[in-house]
């Protein structure tokens, strides 16, 4: 897990669904921390639309036959970016915006994502403010080491 809780999130528990904008340099609602009541329309849409997403490892069989290391890295990075768009923050941003309603709240980056995704600081808590409830440490554990330089 790459989230560090700093304070209780009790004040958000009355909201039907909440998430936060990422700190990545563009508009993105991150799916790293989502809170929702059971059966919320955004969660139901996530489950429905993920079932429609194509398989996430389309390049795996191709990479087995590529000998050039730089081409292999480029293909792996592209596949990681495609995965983000199909199932990660890209997917969640599009879905959250389509199903936005009065019981859905998207919080500013200072709440869950105070550190930018490219931060290389020894302690990401240095980015926290009084509004910060948790810190995303951008561990990218879902990515292979060859593609971990991509945005998440």
Image (tube, grey):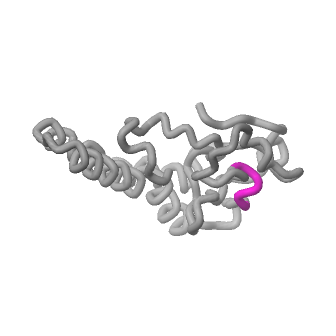
Count of residue discs: 0
Most foreground residue, 66 or 3: 66
The residue under the point 77% across, 41% down is 125
State whether residue 45 is above or below residue 66: below
Q: Is residue 89 left or right of residue 52?
A: right
Q: Residue at x 40, y 36 (%)?
A: 145
Question: x%, y% of residue 108?
Answer: 73, 61
Q: Is residue 18 left or right of residue 127?
A: left
Residue 110: within the magenta?
Answer: yes
For the record, the magenta segment spans 108-112
> Hey, which residue is sitting farthest left in the picture?
65
Assess whether residue 104 is covered by the magenta stretch. no
Q: Please name the residue shown 77% across and 45% down the image.
A: 13
Residue 137, compared with residue 129, is above or below; it is above
Q: Which is more toward the observer, 23 or 44?
A: 23
- Report which quarter residue 6 is drawn in: top right
The x, y position of residue 27, in whole percent, is 57, 68
Q: Position of residue 143 (x, y in %)?
A: 41, 39
The image quarter containing residue 110 is: bottom right
Q: Residue at x 29, y 46 (%)?
A: 73
Main SS of the magenta part reads helix
Find the residue positioned furthest to the top.
1
Above/below status of 91 relative to 149:
below
């Amino acid at each position: 897990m790459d989230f560090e809780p700093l304070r209780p999130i009790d004040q958000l528990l009355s909201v039907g669904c909440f998430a936060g904008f990422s700190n990545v340099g563009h508009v993105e609602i991150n799916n790293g921390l989502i809170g929702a009541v059971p059966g919320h329309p955004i969660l139901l849409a996530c489950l429905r639309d993920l079932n429609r997403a194509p398989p996430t490892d389309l390049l795996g069989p191709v990479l087995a036959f590529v000998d050039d290391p730089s081409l292999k890295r480029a293909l792996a990075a592209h596949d990681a970016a495609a995965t983000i768009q199909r199932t990660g923050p890209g997917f969640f941003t599009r879905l959250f915006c389509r199903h936005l309603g009065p019981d859905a709240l998207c919080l500013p980056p200072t709440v869950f994502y105070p550190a930018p995704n490219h931060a290389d600081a020894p302690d990401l808590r240095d980015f926290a403010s009084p509004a910060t409830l948790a810190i995303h440490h951008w561990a990218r554990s879902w990515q292979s080491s060859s593609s971990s330089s991509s945005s998440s």
